[in-house]
Each structure stands twice: as C-alpha cells, then as structure tokens.
Image (cartoon, rainbow, N blue to C red):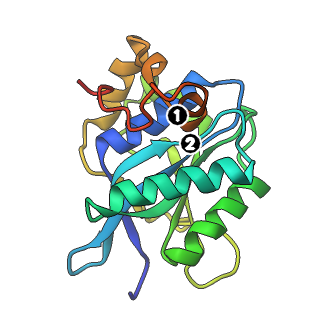
Amino acid sequence: MGGDLRFEISQNAYIKLVLHALKHRSSAVNGVLLGRISGPNDVIEISDSVPLFHSSIGLLPQLEISLLLIEEYYAAKGLNIVGYFHANERFDDYEVGGVAKNIGDHISRFFPHAALLLLDHRKLEALPKRKDRSPVMELYTKETSKNWKLAGSDGSSQLMIKEPSANVVLLDFISSEKWQDVVDFDDHLDDISKDWLNPDLFK
C-alpha cells in the first residue's frame, strides 16, 4: 500500500463510539473498529464498531475474551479488527496514553495498517455551534514508524465519515439521550442478557 492511508468510517460505527463515551463521561472508554481494505485506492472501510470497556479498561483477561468473541463473530461477516478507539477520562487530555498505545500495538500486530482514533472533546463540545461535517476524533497511525503519530497534520484529512450528515444525526441522538442505550463489554460481563452488539441501538 503506497502513500497515505485513508480511512472511511460508517455513520453507525462512528455514532456508537461517541455515544459510548458520552454515557461514561467521567471514565476513560474504549472500543474496536471493524472493517476491511476496499477498492483500488486502498481505503480502509470501517463499517462497524464495538464498545469495549468503561471500568476494566486496562485489564488483559477481559480484553482478550472480548477480542476473541468479536473476531469470531465478525470473521463470519468478512470483517476484521482494523483499529482501536479511545476516549480519555479527563476532558482536557488530548494525549494517546499508555493503555491506548498498548492495545493499539496489539491490534497493529495483526493488522499493520490499524487506525487509532482518539476522541477530541473540544470538537465534540463545539459541534452544536459549528455544524461541522468532520469527525470529532483524531486519527493516529504507525505506518512507517514504531510510534503512533497524528495523521494529516499537514492539513490533509485521512479520516472521513461515509455519510455527510452523520454529525447531524449524532446531535439528534445526543439531544434524545440515546447514549443511555449503549451496551459495552463491561455491561455484558455484568449481565450477559445485555447484548454487546447493540442490535437495537439504531432502530
């Protein structure tokens, strides 16, 4: 794959991650990105996402169990884990921390072109005023380096939302407090009747 990688995230995958972060505003949260490499231009299409944790965020046993279940389910759909999402606990923290790097590194061993998406609280807070179409996340990659680096720092956008109106839908979901319905793996491990696939979230 030559040149800068481009990532395209579907509206539902994108909104699910942001709602998960909003449900647990006082905690760090994380999730994984599911997708595939598509087309002649090697765009990585992120078609779904799975919210992982809000309390046991750095615990290896829970992480390994969840990744195995996710990989098994999505492999049947022809999708792989192609990246990682993280929202920091503190509103003013814009750094990729140790836990995020470690889990991102783990995923990139199996998918070298992996994305690491970090929620940008500033962009999210400004969304109602700015009506911006760009994602409220920063994209980090480690294509040719051992370290995660902010992509598109030269002004080029390497992360796009597939549907242009995604932020309008997101704001609508926020105003109706749809974030209360998001289930993550912490919830599922506490009560297995809660479905980590969130099948009814967008119905």
Asked whether residue 16 appears in the rendered view, the answer is: yes
Query: Residue at 45% of width from left, 36% of height from top?
Result: 196
Going by the image, does 81 lie left or right of 173?
A: right
For the N terminus, give its image quadrant. bottom left
Rendered location of residue 13, percent (x, y): 37, 44
Q: Residue furthest front?
A: 192
Figure quadrant of residue 109: bottom right
Query: Residue at 50% of width from left, 52% of height from top?
Result: 32
Residue kind at label 1, given as amino acid type: Asp
Q: Residue furthest bottom?
A: 2
Q: Residue furthest top?
A: 176
Classify mark 2: residues with Cα within 10 Å, few (<14), some (14-19) or many (20+).
Answer: many
Q: Is residue 75 placed above or below 162 in the rendered structure?
A: below
Rendered location of residue 18, percent (x, y): 48, 34
Residue kind at label 2, given as amino acid type: Leu
Figure quadrant of residue 123: top right
Query: Mark 1 — residue?
Result: 184
Rendered location of residue 117, percent (x, y): 54, 53
Going by the image, does 151 lie left or right of 36?
A: right
Q: Which mark is residue 52?
A: 2
**Mark 1–mark 2 CB contact (< 8 Å):** yes
Rendered location of residue 139, percent (x, y): 53, 58
Label 1, secondary structure: give it: loop
Q: Residue furthest right?
A: 98
Label 2, secondary structure: give it: loop
Whole-angstrom CA distance, mark 1 to mark 2, is 5 Å
For the C terminus, give its image quadrant. top left
Query: Residue at 59% of width from left, 52% of height from top?
Result: 65
